[in-house]
Image: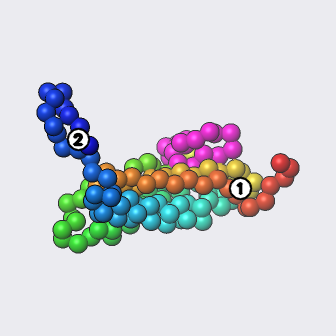
Amino acid sequence: MEATDDAGDAGDYDKTFLEEPAILDKYKAAAEVCEKALTLAIESCVDGADIYEVCQKVDAFVEEELTKTFSNKKSKKLERGIAFPCCISVNEICGHFSPLKDDSYKLKTEDLVKVDLGAHIDGFPASCAHSFVVGGKTKGK
């Protein structure tokens, strides 16, 4: 299956992970970093935690973990980084809230928190998200 460019010539086509197993390894490694970062974010979202600081902490963690992944000489040139910055949306905010320091919010017990984030290795992204209640208990439905 070859793609053609505007001139109609046969060009390079995107390989799948079946044809290039290293692609699957990059997806898996990015997913592992995301899972660790999500765990850190969930543990950091406690009563009184500042959303801005938690987002910064998690993004720094993702960057640090990605430098440890595929760290041999051959893989040093791989691009890697944040595919989707850590966002912590609280209560009525639908999604993708990553505040500036001046716009931040401190979490309270019984806040509904939605965390989402993503990382990529060589352009192969992974993302994850989780919703939970600060303090773990809710009233009503």
- Residue 65 lies in what quarter of the image? bottom left
Q: Position of residue 120 (x, y in %)?
A: 36, 55
On screen, residue 97 versus residue 61, left or right, reads right
Using residue 57 as the reference point, say whether residue 112 is left or right of it: right
* Span colored in magenta: 87-103
Looking at this rendering, what residue extends furthest in the right direction?
Answer: 140
Q: x and y percent of residue 69 in the render?
A: 33, 68
Residue 64 visible in the shown view? no
Q: Classify the position of the N terminus by image quarter.
A: top left
Q: Nearer the viewer, residue 95 or 60?
A: 95
The residue shown at (65%, 46%) is: 90
- The colour scheme is rainbow
Determine the CA span between mark 2 and mark 1: 48 Å
Instruction: Residue 60: name its quadrant.
Output: bottom left
Residue that label 2 marks: 2
- Residue extending furthest front? 1
Secondary structure state at the residue bearing disc 2: loop
Tell me what residue is drawn at x 44 percent, y 61 percent: 31
Mark sitting on residue 133: 1
Name which residue lies at 49% across and 66% down: 36
In terms of secondary structure, where does tag 1 sit? strand
127 or 53, which lies in front? 127
